[in-house]
Amino acid sequence: MLNRSWTGDANICLVQLENVRRALGTRRRTETDDIDRTKRVKEARDEAKKEIEEYRKQKDDEFKKFESEVRLPSLFLGFKAQASG
């Protein structure tokens, strides 16, 4: 008997919860919601990877430019030091 009472109370709570959800305009999460969420997460991850690659390429180009500017004068300094010595 205790079990029936508890089940009845649980059913009443579920009905009340559903009524509150309807009143608030919310609904239960469905499998479609999970698929949409997964899709959005994958798209965000792909977009982030793309942005990271673009940033990495930009910084690599900047570094190569800096490296060529720094190496060229130091090569000349090395040749002058060898010629002097």
Image (tube, grey):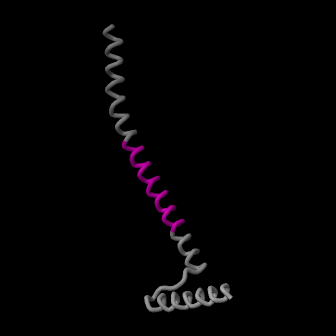
Q: Quadrant of residue 74?
A: top left
Q: Quadrant of residue 75?
A: top left
Q: Main secondary structure of the magenta part?
A: helix
Magenta region: 41-62
Q: Residue at 32% of width from left, 13% of height from top?
A: 81
Q: Residue at 67% of width from left, 88% of height from top?
A: 4
Q: Residue at 43% of width from left, 88% of height from top?
A: 24
Q: Is residue 54 magenta?
A: yes
* Front residue of 19 and 59: 19
Task: Find residue 16 and report its horizontal and vertical position in percent.
Answer: 51, 90
Task: Find residue 38 and report its horizontal and vertical position in percent.
Answer: 56, 70
* Front residue of 75 and 13: 13
Q: Residue at 31% of width from left, 16% of height from top?
A: 80
Task: Find residue 69 and report its horizontal and vertical position in percent.
Answer: 33, 34
- Count of marks, rendered view: 0
Q: Quadrant of the N terminus?
A: bottom right
Q: Is residue 25 magenta?
A: no
Instruction: From the viewer's perspective, tell me whether residue 55 is left or right of residue 1.
Output: left
Q: Residue furthest front?
A: 1
On screen, 76 above or below 81?
below
* Front residue of 18 and 46: 18
On screen, 5 above or below 57?
below
Q: Quadrant of the C terminus?
A: top left
Task: Find residue 13 and report its horizontal and vertical position in percent.
Answer: 54, 87
